[in-house]
Image (cartoon, rainbow, N blue to C red):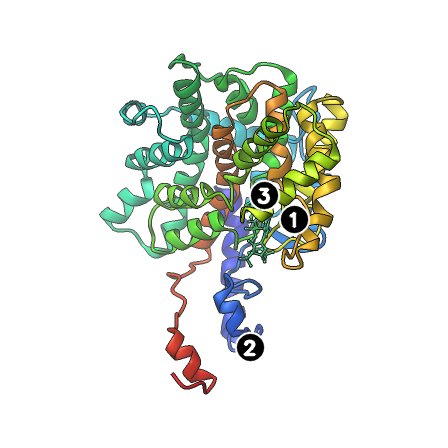
Amino acid sequence: MEKFSAKALPIAADLKAFIKEHGDKKLGEYTIAQTYQGMKGIVGLVTETSKLDPEEGIRFRGYSIPELREKLPKAPKGFEPLPEGIFYLMLMGELPTKEDVMNVSNSWARRAIVPKHVFDTLDHLPKNTHPMTMLSIGVMALQTESEFAKAYQKGINKKNYWEYVYEDAMTLIARLPRVAAYIYRKKYHNDHHIEPNPKLDWAANFAHMLGYETLDVRRLMRLYLTIHADHEGGNVSAHTTHLVGSALSDPYLSFAAGLNGLAGPLHGLANQEVINWIIEMQKQIGKELPTKDEIATYIKKTLEDGKVVPGYGHAVLRKTDPRFSAQQDFYKRYIKQDNMCDIVAMIYEVAPPILEGTGKIKNPWPNVDAHSGALLMHYGIKEFEYYTVLFGVSRALGVMASLIWDRVLGLPIERPGSITIAGLKKKVGVAV
Ligand code: NMX
Ligand code: MLT
């Protein structure tokens, strides 16, 4: 925390001076259409942790995914980055050393004990509760532990908010894999739970608690939890966490809200949808490995039925998502042959021209969710209804790092204006 405050407090002071001097300068103009089309292209947020370029994809504090796979510290005998490293990078704005990563890992291991009432809460839910609903409820149950909420009730100086948010963020990230693994083992393994192993890194320990001990799954989990961590500030889960946090709702309340956004099929749930859609395709065609022509027909039918092709398109990206490419690379490097991954590759060849042909889909290329499920299926993690939980565990890293920055920068409550249809028409001189 000392290292962070030494870095962040001067930046916060500098920002205040910057806004005082330049606050009245224009950032841009926007149209009526943008107001109706999800505010796309309107810059209304400041997010430090990562920045998305429509052509090139995501950069975390300036580093692309291939660069991070090379530069971030790895576990002994590991080939993929440790997610502790990307959290450090997003929070501190600089690449961590091996020791920095060990410190984060140890801090999370020390904080990882989940209070019993969280498990009791999950145990009382109906068996058919969706894993994302369970995760959100699990995070809400963890909220009893919020240091920020307790301190605020006692009364604290604004200047110190960030310290409590930092504590909560670290504890929440530390406990999240245990809660997520509990949900998995409860739902799919008859409540046979696996105790954490504090000697393992965060991702390997998560894989262990899920019931997967191989080096391959550890590798996949480290990559998965790294690449899903953040996607600048405007995506639904990040923006929601930030928005709810701006009311000084504590990190647990804020993150649970973000998770509820991630649970939507146009956002994080798309990873579950992709596998569901491929399995349905296999059933309809009656083959495990359909041909490209058969896949094309299935895609066209999906569009004719007024449904989206899951895993394709993006609100900002206009090229293949580098997170998709990183997973393709993982497949080629470590797996080499798998029918489901081969189907993903065939869809990549077939889908873009068909989607482009509609003339309305702005991005015909695959996003992160187009590939992730196939890799998990390969290693036997076949319960695709659970996949968004993995995304959620990873997304905590980015949105919690951002929430700490929100409070250290002293950002106020978020409250954009809104307008009625009549108000809009009046503005452009159309009779109402
Ligand atoms: N399949 C069919 N139609 C699509 C697709 C798609 N993959 N992508 C966009 N469209 C449609 C979209 O529904 C809209 O139709 P209409 O005008 O009839 O309302 C039209 O194309 C224009 O949409 P865009 O401006 O290209 O996309 P938008 O920014 O509105 O939405 C997504 C972005 C990601 C929500 C959209 O591409 C989509 O629904 N993709 C499939 C779901 C998905 O993979 N989501 C995961 C995104 C990544 N993540 O993890 O969050
Ligand atoms: C994400 O990772 O949040 C998604 O790609 C969605 C987005 O960026 O809007």
Residue 237: x and y, percent?
47, 47
Give amino acid for label 1: Ile
Q: Earlier in the sequence, mark 1 or mark 2?
A: 2
Q: Of 140 and 272, which appears nearest the observer?
A: 272
Badge 2 is on which residue?
25
Badge 1 is on which residue?
58
Q: Residues within 10 Å of mark 1 (few under 14, many from 20)?
A: many
Q: Of 293 and 164, which appears nearest the observer?
A: 293
Q: Secondary structure at mark 3?
A: helix
Work out how far the residue at label 3 is from the one at label 2, CA to CA, in angstroms: 47 Å
Q: Earlier in the sequence, mark 3 or mark 1?
A: 1
Callout in the foreground (3, 1)? 3
Q: Residues within 10 Å of mark 3 (few under 14, many from 20)?
A: some
**Corner quadrant of residue 195:** top left
Residue at the image point whose x is 64% and y is 29% from the top: 285
Q: Residues within 10 Å of mark 2 (few under 14, many from 20)?
A: few
Kindly tell me whether mark 3's CB lies below 8 Å from ligand 1: yes
Residue 315: x and y, percent?
58, 55
Kindly tell me whether mark 1's CB lies below 8 Å from ligand 2: yes
Q: Earlier in the sequence, mark 3 or mark 2?
A: 2
Residue at the image point whose x is 52% and y is 28% from the top: 384
Q: Of 104 and 214, which appears nearest the observer?
A: 214
Residue 302 is labelled as: 3
Residue 369: x and y, percent?
59, 38
